[in-house]
Image (cartoon, helix red, strand yellow):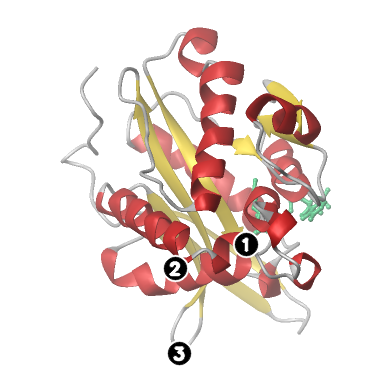
Amino acid sequence: MADWERPKDLPYPMVWRKFTRTMSDGREHKFRIQDASQDMFDEIYDLFKVHFMTEEPICSVLGCSQCIEINKLISDMVNDEVSLKEMEIYWRSELRRKTLIVCFEEVPDGKDVLVSCNVMGVRTKGNLLKVAATGRALVAMNKIMEHIWLEVAKIYEAFNVDKYLSAYGLSVHRDYRGIGIGVEMLLARTEYCKANKIEFTVTAFTSKGGQRAGEKAGFDFHLSKLYSDIEKDTGVNLTGIKHDCIKDV
Ligand SMILES: CC(C)(COP(=O)(O)OP(=O)(O)OC[C@H]1O[C@@H](n2cnc3c(N)ncnc32)[C@H](O)[C@@H]1OP(=O)(O)O)[C@@H](O)C(=O)NCCC(=O)NCCS
């Protein structure tokens, strides 16, 4: 099947959702979820480095047998410069394909604050995603993800689809957690799919928070796989992982 392209008649960047939340200061704050654009890359990169890589269960433990600072929120992925550079190349390629969405807090009379990003990507049958990897952490991450997508979930066969929207990282800024931004980002994904004429979306939810947000956004869980079994099946060392399983929806 031909590789996917965003419909040419769909405006870009699009705003997908707007919502408000009353926060701890008692005030109502306004938020906007929209397509990411090229000029946002540095902010997105920082958000992922600080608020995702150090906490997402797999990124935070990869190779941790050699990472003595694992309990200090120091992620091996962040310390692995080669993997980080390769992730950056991948994120930039998805940004060019217009498959990243971001959430901003709208600040009256000031600069809007980036509070969340979801890196997504459209997969089509026969075009296997290969995040080019030589860095130790990213090679291990690829091994796990290929195992989940191709050997365990078997999306194309299980759901009889030839394309789907996948995701490679949902990150919410720590100061903005627990107020439903993760759920709103997943709901925005549904709107993104409709407008882009993509009928199906799948995520391997790797953390408890992500799994709960998926449940609340109405995603159906297709399978669940224990990290202990993933370790056995892939040979990747996940010592120290703080969560039980990956859930795929
Ligand atoms: C996971 C993450 C995206 C959730 O974002 P969020 O905006 O805080 O989530 P929401 O406020 O929408 O919460 C949705 C639900 O998940 C629950 N939840 C959030 N974080 C949780 C956690 N760490 N453990 C258990 N439940 C959690 C919330 O309590 C809420 O459920 P409730 O309404 O029943 O209480 C965010 O914590 C994050 O960026 N984590 C680091 C990276 C990561 O793990 N990404 C996801 C990989 S799948």
Q: Secondary structure at mark 1?
A: helix
Residue sitting at x 50%, y 49%? 138
Residue sitting at x 66%, y 54%? 56
Nearest the eye: 28 or 16: 16
Nearest the eye: 230 or 173: 230
Q: Amino acid at mark 1?
A: Asp
Q: How many angstroms separate mark 3 from mark 2 (CA)?
A: 21 Å
Q: Amino acid at mark 3?
A: Gly
Where does label 2 land, which residue? 45
Query: Nearer the observer, disc 3 or disc 2?
Result: 2
Q: Amino acid at mark 2?
A: Tyr
The percent coordinates of residue 23 (x first, y second) are 73, 75
Q: How many angstroms separate mark 3 from mark 1 (CA)?
A: 35 Å
Q: Residues within 10 Å of mark 3 (few under 14, many from 20)?
A: few
Location of the C terminus by quadrant is top right
Q: How many angstroms separate mark 1 from mark 2 (CA)?
A: 16 Å
